[in-house]
Image (cartoon, rainbow, N blue to C red):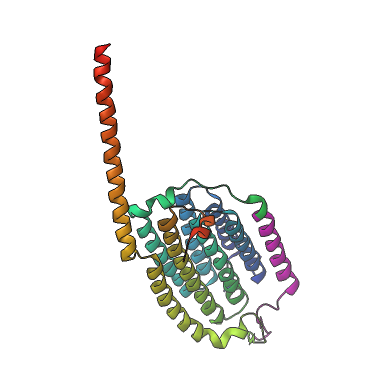
Amino acid sequence: MTIGAGQFAVLSAAVFAIGLYGVLARRHPLAVAMSIGLLFAAPVIALVGFTHAVQAPPIAIGDGLAAFAIVAASCVCGLAFALIVLLWRRTGRADIDALGDLEA
Amino acid sequence: MTPNAVAFYAIALLIVLAAGAAVGLPSLRRAGYAGAAVIVLLALLEIVSGAYALAVVQLVVPGVAAAVVAMVLRRDAYIGLVGVPPARERFWIAAPIAVGIAAVLVVTVAANGSSWYPEVTGHGVVDLSPALITVFHYRVPYALAISVVLVLASAGVGLVIGRRSGDEQTLDQRLQLRREREELARRRREDREQGRRRPARNDS
């Protein structure tokens, strides 16, 4: 049995759905930030599959884009964490609904 | 390199379980460990698929970010951020949306077949007809350059957002002094009340 891009795509969809559930369901901002990280991990899985499971020899295009996605995900999560720290200091609450209490 | 089927399915199952744990566990500390496990498992999947350089990026970049977050959360001022009891989740809204999106993704991939990625022709030559990956190929160097700029910019912006300003430090010090004064006043009040009660007991 060989593994093709379809299997990677299904795994990617599963991880994306789990991350989306976390973003919508969880209310702790750290949990939401972690779920956003999962959302970003999903396309990386798909890109790896499209690049390495299909092409022989693989071209570096998919890897380059996947590396960019990983860096972007880390940057987004880092910025989200900075906002969470700010939220905690200003409101003393760890609830995504407390974002409305932040004033400019 | 086509990945080994057994290794792929084993790692895929572990990734789904770890991702579910990272999202579903009520304890944030354990959820964090599960999130770290997802990162390591993704790197393993990339190694199994032959993307060795990407596996290194997968481990190093999020690893550094996670280490910084862990260092900040260990400080006294932010330790309470992890220990907050979990709020009620919005399961009935989130679950149907997530399942629906997953179904749409799977159906879309199944319906498109091989048009998402470039095909290998009969002689082992990659057919670079327009596809999800090939339309971006000439932009990859730019993407890598932009990623470096992105890291530097986000680190700078993160520091600016997260740092405590001079006003905030002064305010925190005054709040701390006020709390100490109130605590001292409360103790004195309690001592006075105890002192008043004692002679009353002796008289009776």
Q: The C terminus of chain B is located in which quarter?
A: top left
Decide whether residue B98 is among the magenta residues.
Answer: yes
The residue at 41%/68% (across/down) is B161
Image side of residue B20 versus residue B110, left or right: left
Position of B152 relative to B163 (above/below): below
Q: Does residue B58 show up?
A: no
Decide whether residue B188 is among the magenta residues.
Answer: no
The residue at 47%/69% (across/down) is A74
In percent of width and height, residue B97 lies at 68, 59
Position of B102 relative to A71 (above/below): above
Residue furthest out toward the right: B111
Q: Which stretch is magenta?
A: B94-123
In percent of width and height, residue B2 lies at 59, 71
Camera-nearest residue between A99 and A32: A99
Camera-nearest residue between B99 and B2: B99
In percent of width and height, residue B184 lies at 26, 40
